[in-house]
Amino acid sequence: MSDPINYNAFTRAEWRAFSDDAKLPLTQESLRQIKAFNDRISLQDVQDIYIPLVHLLRLQFNHYRLLQQDKAAFLQQPAHRVPFIIGIAGSVAVGKSTAARLLEVLLNHYFKNSNIQLITTDGFLYPNDELKRRQLMSRKGFPESYDMAALIQFLNDVKAGVPSIKAPLYSHKIYDIVPDEFETITAPDILIVEGINTLQLPTNEQIYVSDFTDFSIYVDAEANLIEDWFLERFELLLETAFQDPENYYYPYAIGDRDEAMAKGKKVWEDIDLKNLEEYILPTRNRADMIIHKTIGHRIDRLLLRKY
């Protein structure tokens, strides 16, 4: 498939050349703590891919700040801080969460005296009881399974400068919203929003999540590779879930492993692949940057929007 005409494409080596060889602010151990279960990422990836990306984000952020100041002056209004929002989208199991956490760490290091925070849109899924009531459990992760009005109100409050905002907390351990627990966002300079739906255009909403993002990233890979990573992650979850009866995966972990893996494959085919093809992948070319992965989660190409 040819690249979209409104993107510049770079090989890994070309992209790395946009940065210097500054000492990395991470060790192998700290990187291990950041990455997801079965994601593959190295200090070389940080040097080649993410350090140049952070430098680009600095340019974007500085330009954004100046624009906000100029706009306030034009409108003869007091200047106030409007948070810069980075959206990270892509399929399940493609490595979005690792990319988001790594960016959070790097931005905290390079953007001194700035408040950097991270949130995932998983917290805005309807609770399982509500999904069951709406007969949507088999559509969990699809656009209609999210409380989009609540997510949009949350993002609007962030942009409006509300000093402290609560967001629902989602647990992958119990596969549900955690009752009476919240994440609190407190006046960020930069907010990273990670989720499969950050670039989607949901129905019945006049405002979209992407209307609030100032720079968006789509983490991309071929569907057959993502399936491999999904099933690999599923099996790794089973390796630990058998120790915890409260874990959502516990019944699969203590049962027949072949049956469990067959169940995981069916979930991929019936839910996650369908969601990818129908709702997630069509948003790829709305991103400011596309980070493309190949075998072993290796990033081989980057596409940056021209205009």
Image: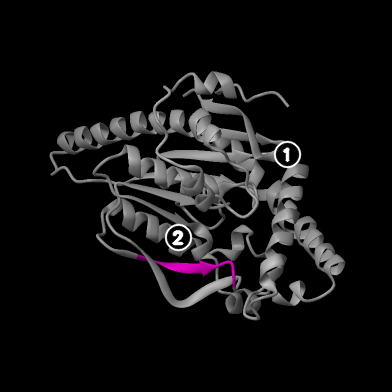
The residue lying at 64 percent from left, 52 percent from top is 92
Q: Amino acid at mark 1?
A: Glu
Q: Quadrant of the N terminus?
A: top right
Label 2's element?
A: helix
Q: Position of residue 101 (x, y in %)?
A: 47, 49
Q: Which residue is mark 1?
A: 222
Label 1's element?
A: loop
Number of labels in the image equals: 2
Visual colour scheme: one colour
Q: Position of residue 104 (x, y in %)?
A: 41, 46
Task: Give the vertical position of 164 relative to 158 (above or below).
Answer: below
Q: Nearer the viewer, residue 27 or 265?
A: 27
Overall secondary structure of the magenta section: strand
Please indicate whether residue 172 sits to the left or right of residue 111 in the image. right
Q: Position of residue 158 (x, y in %)?
A: 33, 55
Q: Which residue is mark 2?
A: 151
Q: Which residues are magenta?
A: 166-173
Quarter of the rendering containing residue 166: bottom left
> Is residue 208 among what the camera can see?
no
Q: Nearer the viewer, residue 43 or 207?
A: 43
Please indicate whether residue 143 sits to the left or right of residue 79 in the image. right
Label 1, residues with CA under 10 Å away: few <14, some 14-19, many ≥20: few
Q: Nearer the viewer, residue 184 or 25?
A: 25
Task: Give the vertical position of 14 relative to 102 (above or below).
Answer: above
Task: Give the vertical position of 202 relative to 254 (above or below).
Answer: above
Q: Earlier in the sequence, mark 2 or mark 1?
A: 2
The residue lying at 72 percent from left, 67 percent from top is 238
Label 2, residues with CA under 10 Å away: few <14, some 14-19, many ≥20: some
Q: Amino acid at mark 2?
A: Leu
